[in-house]
Image (spheres, grey):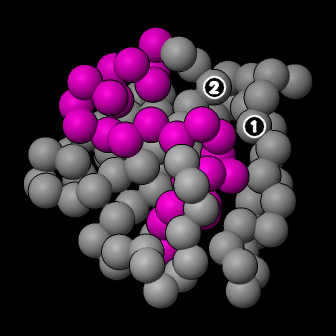
Amino acid sequence: MAAKTASKKSKNTVGVIGLGIMGGAFARNLAAAGWRVVGYDISPAARRSAARAGVEIARSAADVADETLVRHPTLGPHGSRGVVGTGPGGFSRIEVGAD
């Protein structure tokens, strides 16, 4: 996904990082309610499931941050690690992957 400037980002778009049990349900429900949802997960199966429910899949967690104004990280203990901080440009640092 190409990065967008903040002025082009829709306030009706939500980013979800982590599309497992909690994040996947969150993303699917928002998509079903008509929201544009951009998501990412390290699991290909979670990405496929979310895509079938109407979630746009980003190439990385950083791309989710670039595409959205509202972001919901749902990083669980299943091999994800991360430092998520917000700043003027969105997420200041994101690391998602196996320990």
Residue at the outermost right position: 99
Residue 72, label in figure:
none
Q: Which span of residues is magenta-colored?
A: 45-69
Q: Position of residue 11 (x, y in %)?
A: 34, 78
Looking at the rendered structure, the secondary structure element under dot 1 is loop
Where 69 falls versus 2 (above or below)? below
Q: Residue at x 34, y 65 (%)?
A: 13
Residue 42, label in figure:
2
Residue at the outermost left position: 33
Q: Nearer the viewer, residue 56 or 75?
A: 56
Callout count = 2
Where 91 falls versus 33 (above or below)? below
- The amino acid at mark 1 is Val
Q: Residues within 10 Å of mark 2 (few under 14, many from 20)?
A: some
Residue 96, label in figure:
1
Question: Which of the image's four quarters has the C terminus?
Answer: top right
Q: Main secondary structure of the magenta part?
A: helix
Q: Position of residue 44 (x, y in %)?
A: 53, 16
Q: Nearer the viewer, residue 81 or 41?
A: 41
Where 87 falls versus 71 (above or below)? below
Sequence-wise, which precedes: disc 2 or disc 1?
2
Q: Residue at x 81, y 44 (%)?
A: 95
- The amino acid at mark 2 is Ile
Looking at the rendered structure, the secondary structure element under dot 2 is loop
